[in-house]
Amino acid sequence: MASSDYLSRLSGYYPSVWPAECAGPRRQKIVSSPGLNIQPDEHLVGHARILEPGRWPVMFVQRAKGELYLQGGSSFGVSDNTSGWVEQLNPISLEPIRRSPDLPSGGHKWCGAICVHENGDLYVVNGTYVHRLSPDLEVIAEHRLAANNAHNGHVVLSDGNIVTKDISDDVAKHSVFTVLDPDLNVVDVFECPWNSVGRFSSDRQEGVDYLYVTSNDVIHRLQYINGRLSLDETWSASYRVEGEDSGYAWDSAIGDDCAWFMDNGESQSTINMLAASPTGTGEAMPFAPPVHTAPVRVWRVSTIDSSDCESFIPFGTPSGHIVSPPLYDQDRHILVAFDSQNGGIGAWRYDGPGNFIPLWKKDWRNANQLTLYADTGELIVDHVHKMGEWDAVVLDIESGVEKGRADTGCFMPMGMWYTPGFERDFYTSTAVGRIGRVSVA
């Protein structure tokens, strides 16, 4: 069975609860620290910080106890400022303790990524650049990537090297993976024979690092052996259904020896932003009109045998859309999926191929990445009421029973992350310049 990020000593990563986006390379988003454990006489409260205009706060990571970092860039659209940045924050007030210098992006505006490496330093991907920062946010090294495009996400491989990929929805282009050593020297460059939009996940099997990445209609696997990436010709699966008008997938998550993901990731907003040059300077359109007619499908592809591939339709509403992946809890064998366009979030117990047992459904609209506390089964989701008004809600993953909710003060969820705090709290952010802390009271 695939390892659980929250139970594993993640090779290459700093030993914290949340050292990277999605908490680890398998993108499981399951938390090892004690859950919120919300009691019947307790509730959630939210506190927000409004950032300076034009800033896009993307994601939080934890380093040592009490060390909270926020990575971000510049807001979508045309503006003079395209820099990235990192702040170390007070974990209670969210006020900055220190901030990095402005980090160049090559003019691109996209949600990059940050991780805490096992060497204790921070690695940031932003536009066409990768930076290595000290814990005090001084720049140690800088590397401009060869692909003149925004890069979305990175993974630390088991040997400590870092791999990143550029983002493209143009089927005439080829996405490029770049492997860097911790000093940001190039180790390898691999040009895919297809384009890719979604972030990639990684799992180690029998001594090999495998990378799972979606193109416009196929999920592929790369293998990393002796410092070199290559396409695994023995493993791939189409995720298009004949006769359906559906869109590309974003990220995948690994659990129960399967890759889990959802299709219909394309919208008029992503078309605008990815078609612009530089990337992200087009018009962002939250909850833009749909561009495909099919409902959202969840896909499962075995990492052992890619011919073991299936999908199911969780809601059935036409013209579905998502911007983030489902959550799969391999301890409980529970899948949580959603439709961000039409509304709908629910959970199913996976009981083997073709057997998804419904547990609960709600008609809420969720956009952000989901997060689960392993010990208590507390699941953090969105409930978007209308544009500019949304709650973070904690549910029991087995029953769907609501345990608490709070207005985050963050205006609009846009596929960002929920990150656990150091106490009974968690953090979130939004592309329109706000960050929030939600705590138990």
Image (tube, rainbow, N blue to C red):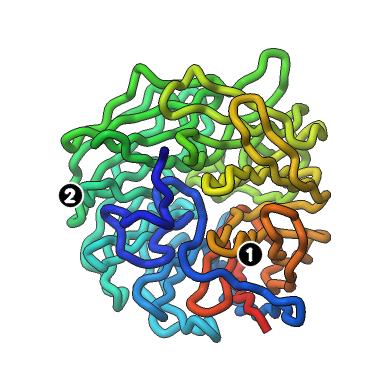
**Residue drawn at x 70%, y 74% as measured from the top left:** 409
Image quadrant in which you'd find residue 383: bottom right
Give the amino acid at mark 1.
Answer: Val
Q: Residue 315 placed where, x, y %? A: 78, 36
Please state, as top left, top right, bottom left or bottom right, where the C terminus lies in the image: bottom right
Disc 1 element: loop
Looking at the image, residue 109 sits to the left or right of residue 44; the answer is left
Disc 2 element: loop
Q: Mark 1 or mark 2, which has the lower sequence index?
A: 2
Q: Which residue is more in the foreground, 438 or 99?
A: 438
Looking at the image, residue 421 sits to the left or right of residue 401; the answer is left
Q: Measured along the vertical axis of the image, is residue 420 above or below residue 226?
A: below
Q: Which residue is mark 1?
A: 432
Give the amino acid at mark 2.
Answer: Asn
Asked if labels 2 and 1 touch by Cβ distance under 8 angstroms, the answer is no
Q: Which residue is mark 2?
A: 185
Q: Which residue is more in the foreground, 316 or 330?
A: 330
**Residue drawn at x 50%, y 61% as measured from the top left:** 31
Q: Residue 328 placed where, x, y %? A: 57, 45
